[in-house]
């Protein structure tokens, strides 16, 4: 195995030079400063070294290509052992970041329905990408399988929890917020009311699927 690794490193600089010549020939702009090299090597022992001591330096278009322990490529963080620990940690951090900010969606409780629909479309696309579902699978089924509430359902539940807490709060101003009455449906500015309006078609379909599942259980 060591012989194969040495043989690869002997031919690698020449292959990079030929690649650079090909870029020049076809006038393809390449930024070597944004390039990196990574050695994929399986080992049970964790080493602090990025590469082995005898690993040669690499250059492209007279610019040095640094060896790195990990590198982000097309949204995926690749590590030299292909354990994907850094990628999973980064995805988890992003998920926690956006989850923590879902609370801010309460400001949309009286937004224009068309604007909320655009957000719901994004969530539907996320569900389809996460499950790799066929186009014919309904969005309601995806939400049911993922146990993921629709945006309107999430905002209604979060708002209800807020008003329940506010109703017993020692601050009189917060208790008064529980008695808030939204504008009537005939008001010249029509907004969706998160607590009192009927659920949208998608939310109703998901609720129906959940009720059927609870009945069978």
Image (spheres, helix red, strand yellow):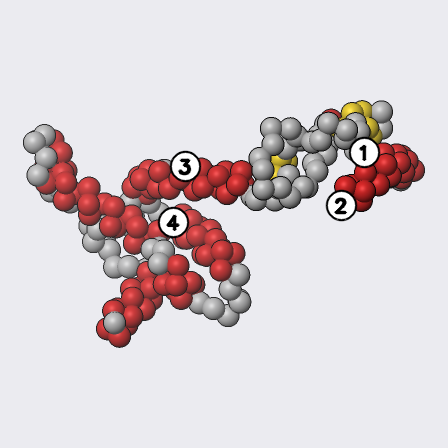
Q: Comparing marks 3 and 2, which lies closer to the viewer?
A: 2
- Compared across the picture, whether 33 is left or right of 138 comes to right
Which sits earlier in the primary sequence, circle 1 or circle 2?
A: 2
**What residue sits 60% from the left and 32% below the top?**
47
Q: Where's residue 2, x and y in %?
A: 77, 41
Q: Is residue 207 left or right of residue 69?
A: left
Rendered image: mark on residue 116: 4
Residue 175 point in image, percent of width and height: 10, 36
| Helix, strand or loop at mark 3 | helix
Q: CA distance from mark 3 to mark 1?
A: 36 Å
Q: Which numbered mark, 4 or 1, is in the foreground of this view? A: 1
Confirm or deny contact between disc 4 and disc 1 (CB under 8 A).
no
The numbered mark, 3 or 2, whose residue comes first in the sequence reads: 2
Are the two marked residues, 4 and 3, in contact with CB atoms closer than 8 angstroms? no
Secondary structure of the residue carrying tag 2 is loop
Q: Earlier in the sequence, mark 2 or mark 4?
A: 2
Which numbered mark, 1 or 2, is in the foreground of this view?
2
Outermost residue, bottom side: 216
Left or right of 17 on screen, residue 55: left
**Mark-to-mark CA distance, 4 and 1:** 42 Å
Q: Are marks 2 and 4 in contact (CB under 8 Å)?
A: no
Q: Residues within 10 Å of mark 3 (few under 14, many from 20)?
A: few
Q: Which residue is mark 3?
A: 97
Q: Mark 2 or mark 4: which is in front? A: 2
Q: Secondary structure at mark 1?
A: loop
Instruction: State the separation of the CA atoms marked 3 and 2.
Output: 43 Å
Question: Which labelled disc corresponds to residue 1?
Answer: 2
| Quarter occupied by residue 83 | top right
């Amino acid at each position: 195995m060591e012989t194969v690794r040495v043989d690869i490193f002997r031919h690698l600089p020449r292959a990079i030079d030929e690649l650079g010549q090909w870029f020049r020939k076809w006038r393809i702009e390449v930024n070597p400063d944004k390039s990196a090299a990574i050695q994929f090597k399986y080992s049970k022992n964790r080493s602090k070294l990025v590469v082995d001591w005898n690993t040669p330096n690499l250059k492209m278009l007279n610019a040095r290509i640094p060896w790195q322990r990990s590198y982000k490529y097309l949204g995926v963080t690749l590590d030299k052992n292909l354990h994907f620990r850094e990628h999973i940690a980064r995805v988890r951090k992003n998920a926690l970041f956006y989850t923590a900010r879902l609370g801010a969606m309460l400001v949309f409780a009286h937004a224009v329905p068309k604007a909320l629909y655009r957000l719901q479309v994004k969530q539907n696309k996320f569900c389809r990408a996460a499950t790799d579902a066929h186009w014919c699978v309904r969005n309601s089924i995806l939400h049911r399988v993922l146990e993921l509430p629709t945006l309107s359902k999430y905002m209604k539940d979060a708002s209800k929890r807020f008003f329940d807490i506010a109703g017993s709060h020692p601050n009189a101003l917060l208790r008064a917020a529980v008695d808030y009455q939204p504008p009537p449906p005939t008001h010249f500015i029509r907004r969706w009311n998160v607590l009192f309006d009927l659920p949208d078609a998608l939310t109703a379909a998901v609720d129906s699927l959940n009720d059927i599942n609870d009945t069978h259980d």
